[in-house]
Amino acid sequence: MAAKRFFGETGSDADPPSEKRMRARPSFASVIGEVVMVNSLKHLCSGLEPMLRRVVNEEVERSLARRTRTLTRVPSLRIQALEPSSLELRFSKSLTLPIFTGSKIVDVDGSQLQIIIVDTRGEQAVPPTLPSPIKVEIVVLDGDFPPGDRTNWTSDEFDRNIVRERQGKRPLLAGELSVTMRNNGVAAIGEIELTDNSSWIRSRRFKLGARVSTGSYQGIRIREAMTEAFIVKDHRGELYKKHYPPQLGDEVWRLEKIGKEGAFHKKLGDEGIHTVQDFLKVSVVEPNKLRRILGPGMSEKIWDATIKHARTCEMGNKHYIYQGPNFSITLNPICQVERAEVNGQVYTHKDLSNSIIRPYIESLVRQAYFNWTALEETEVPYNPEAAQLTLGEVEDQYPTHYLLTDKAFEEYLPNNSHAQIGAGNDWQITSPFVAAPFEHAIRYVIPETSSSSDGNSLAPPRSFMDGR
């Protein structure tokens, strides 16, 4: 009986037909083809190797050289960049305010804006010499930047606070917004203007800023510049703006607290006070009348603000001469005495401050005021030290009534009847030039004037002092 054959045993002497087909020997032709291909690749690689080595070496050397040049310059600059930069841009002068939309932005002197670069190392900032020109860009900033009392900021913070135009509006800043700063470290900005007011942002104020344009400079950081914060008003408000300082020929409503077509403006116009010069002349010669014209609606605080603004007016070079047979006085444009000559004797404003002839000069000033158009006009350089006999200098030294001796004053009496001869015993002597009453004296009366003055009466001494 034949033994049973188990599953794992291999009792077959021949392989299955499929295995025989897989183990078929390669043909002679295929073997020869493979040998030829291998030889060809070996020859190709041996031929390409020198060329590939040369190319790789050149690229590596070029890359190393570039890296070496960068490393010789960058490390020190990177170290400095971590520290506060000593170079910064600045606007050379502050801006002329207020600023209106569509109006040219200029500095406080009325000239075009300038950007400078300074080195803040040391006790004083000095302008450095730039190795090459740089481009500077002008932008608009939020008026509240930087917050608090900070005096330093990063470039990213600066960029984040640049204000752009409102949707649907023109670019917020128009004009020459990019300028070149040469080696001298100065760049002049051409005409620039704001096209929108500042009321729509939270701070309601803008600042002008200046920064180095990206890509125009490689080096340590140059800190950005910025102006003080300011409000931008619509152009229509410029028609009503005040002038700082006012000019003599400006309409009187250009003064503070006097609105165009307002109550004060109309009251002044009704009295023939149309210009700043008219206002100042009345404030010098007839201050009480001016206060009556303006009425109780003008409080002391408003009056002080208006008169203070008016007195910043530039006087110019014009002077006015009033003369008669024995006198000649020179006045500035607002009726203040600069020089007087009586009977050949010359008096300056300092001489007149403490002189017995002062009342007579004041009467001449008043006459000149009421005959202003008939005065001789001359033009000489203005000397602010040379004038101004105004009663504010010695306001309390001269009472309304002057008591003077015959001998001291008789030769200076005017031809009108304001000087009266009479007993002086009933007058208390308050003039610093008379120590005791005289039995026979001249009583020189300078009456207070009223708003209905005919122009022939003398002004109170107070009106020539300081206009109060």
Image: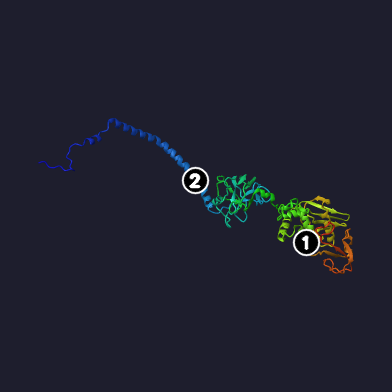
Residue 127 vs residue 157, the one in the foreground: 157
Mark number for residue 104?
Answer: none
Relative to 443, 24 lies left or right:
left
Q: How does the figure colour the protein chain or chains? A: rainbow
Contact, mark 1 vs mark 2 (Cβ under 8 Å): no
Residue 417 vs residue 189, the one in the foreground: 417
Mark number for residue 393?
Answer: 1
66 up-or-down from 228: above or below: above
Is residue 262 in sight in this rendering? yes
Residue closest to the far top: 29
State the image coordinates of residue 349 (x, y, percent, origin top left).
80, 58
Residue drawn at the location 82% of the way across and 54% of the way down:
370
Q: Which of marks 1 and 2 is nearer the N terminus?
A: 2
Is residue 189 in sight in this rendering? no
State the image coordinates of residue 314 (x, y, percent, origin top left).
74, 53
Residue drawn at the location 84% of the way across and 64% of the way down:
402
Residue at mark 2: 68
Residue closest to the far left: 1
Q: Which amino acid does label 2 sit on?
A: Thr
